[in-house]
Amino acid sequence: MTSIANHICKLSRTRRVLHTFNKRLFCADGIQYKAKIPQRLIHRHDFERFLTSYDNFFLDCDGVLWQTDHVTPLGGISQTIELLHSLNKRLVYVTNNSMHGRSMYVKKFKKYGFEAAIENIFGVAYAAAVYLKKVSKVTKKVYVLGSKGMVEEMDLLNIDHFGYGPDPDKPSWDPEELLKMEFSDDVGAVLIGFDEFFNYNKIFKAASYLTDNSCLYVATNNIESGVLIAPNRRQPLTACLVTAVTAASKREPVVLGKPNTLLFDCIVEQYPSLVKNRTVFIGDSLKADVAFANNVGIDSALVLTGSTTLEMLKAMPNLQPTYILDSLADLCK
Ligand SMILES: [Mg+2]
């Protein structure tokens, strides 16, 4: 854990690099950044060559292992995972989803027909707990707008936290009522991830704690803002919550998730012999997964089972993967 924490210490440097990268990435003149042309993998021999090219397969979860609604299965995934295991490939799961901690992911994977060791799961709920405890060394309480999985990861590191679940105060617009609400005097950080109980009171409280500049502001990700879970139903995700608190507090958070390279630093610490040119990231998001792979200098494969369509890919010529796969399941065709 400590060694992972040491790598997380690189976060501030990583953020500066990322900022520079993003400026270059979105440069519209096409001069500073030479776009790659992705190779579409269609035939059996394409898949075979792809499989022999890499030893380490980093897998995003939502939109890759199951659909972006977090629930609906994708056909053939468990067979593909089995194939990769039988070929002695190293599988590492890297997710921005803060709904679950690592132990909950182990259980979820089992439900979908495959197994993963907890040490091969690198999620932002885990990263947030490590960041607060080992890097920032927060000793005061953490106000959490987050999930059960985030709380579980914090409990494992004995972090003093509060705020999970419904806010206890009755909602109000009235400043007199707002001033009667319950506040803690000893808050060292505000942490935001996915919070199904998010509401006006929580924005008010988070923004109020953040008026103290010594109070840290940490977010699991600011990329995933929402997903269609039915043709006319759009589920808001973590970035919406972060945007609300950022606007209310006039503070900018430290962001832990992809495309930030923090999670890669953690993985390298666990597998120091990992060879970058034998490593590929398979994901469904250009701005999170493909940008993450580009940032850390590894190849990437975009799957079309998630949040990105071919039309969206064409619209982002400066952010292209190494490969395009219709589905992860194609690998065992
Ligand atoms: Mg995804």
Image: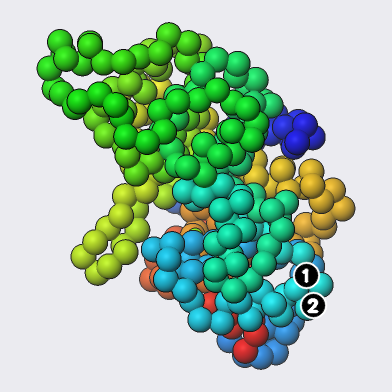
- Quarter of the image for residue 42 reads bottom right
Is residue 217 something that shows in the picture?
A: no
Residue sitting at x 37%, y 36%:
165
Q: Which residue is mark 2?
A: 87
Badge 2 vs badge 1, beta-carbon distance below 8 Å: yes
Name the kind of residue labelled 2 in the image.
Answer: Leu
Say above or below: 286 vs 187.
below
* Apparent side of residue 149 relative to residue 234 in the rendered image (left or right): right
- What x and y, as percent, mark residue 179? 22, 11
Asked whether 274 or 98 is in front, the reply is: 98
* Apparent side of residue 22 relative to residue 182 in the rendered image (left or right): right
Residue sitting at x 56%, y 82%:
76
**Counting other residues with Cα less than 10 Å from the Cα at mark 1, is it few (<14), some (14-19), or many (20 or more)?**
some
Q: Which residue is mark 1?
A: 89
- Quarter of the image for residue 222 reads top left
- What x and y, as percent, mark residue 7? 74, 35
State the separation of the CA atoms marked 2 and 1: 6 Å
- Indicate the secondary structure of the residue bearing disc 2: loop
Name the kind of residue labelled 1 in the image.
Answer: Lys
